[in-house]
Amino acid sequence: MVRVYVDDLVIIGANCDDIKQFKKEMANAFKMSDLDLLCYYLDIEVRQSARGTSISQGAYVAKILERSGMAGCNPCQVPMATRLKLSKRSTEPLVDATAYRNIMGSLRYLVNTRPDLAFAVGYVSHLLEEPRKDHLAAVKQILRYVRGTKSWGLKYERKEEQVQLTGFSDSDFAGDVDARKSTTGVIFFLANSPIT
């Protein structure tokens, strides 16, 4: 499999000889550099060993915190307060919508390696149109949580036994206070490591 982003290629396969042959053919056709094992790609840090692969975004978290003015914030234990109810009809003052959306876009990208953030980030993402002070406070709590857990990521261990796919789903009932819509969440694990 070949993953391409602009002029960066990631080559994945089970047969090292096939990968070497592909690289050789590409080098004959194009000017390219072989950086060997993948260690960093699109703000995702990749660590590979004989025991498995782990991915995280610690450096990206530092960038998010710096850009949002939260680099020195106090960490907290949870990404969102229990039973938090935010409304699009909030009467709190408006905040800078562009800055809010910028932070939200960054957090949504971070969810790729941090499924623990998925619900909280998804919840505040529906408030992009006219973000208010209380909405921003919820986003800042996520940032405080991220600061305290910036080294977290996903770990995929090599297993000798048969790999099993397991999935879970759940939903609330009319949790959206504005539209009375429900939220569904799903997570799938392959060999006890989250993949969605």
Image (cartoon, grey):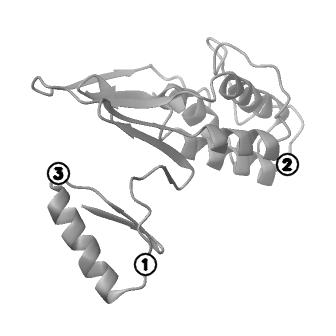
Q: Secondary structure at mark 3?
A: loop
Of the two numbered discs 1 and 3 on the same chain, state the one appearing first in sequence.
3
Front position in the image: 138 or 93:
138
For the N terminus, give its image quadrant.
bottom left
Indicate which disc residue 96 carries.
2
For the C terminus, give its image quadrant.
top left
State the image coordinates of residue 53 (x, y, percent, origin top left): 36, 36
State the image coordinates of residue 114 (x, y, percent, origin top left): 51, 32
Q: Are marks 1 and 3 in contact (CB under 8 Å)?
A: no
Indicate which disc residue 187 carries.
none
Q: How many marks?
A: 3
Instruction: Determine which residue is flagged by label 1.
Output: 32
Q: Is residue 126 visible?
A: no
Instruction: Determine which residue is flagged by label 3.
Output: 14
Of the two numbered discs 3 and 2 on the same chain, state the one appearing first in sequence.
3
Of the two numbered discs 2 and 1 on the same chain, state the one appearing first in sequence.
1
* Rendered position, 117 above or below 108: above
Tell me the amino acid under the disc marked 3: Ala
| Structural distance between the alpha carbons of marks 1 and 3 | 22 Å
Question: Crowding at label 2, few (<14), some or many (≥20) Cα neighbours within 10 Å?
Answer: few
* Rendered position, 118 above or below 126: above
Q: Is residue 184 visible?
A: yes
The quarter of the displayed image where residue 123 is located: top right
Tell me the amino acid under the disc marked 2: Asp
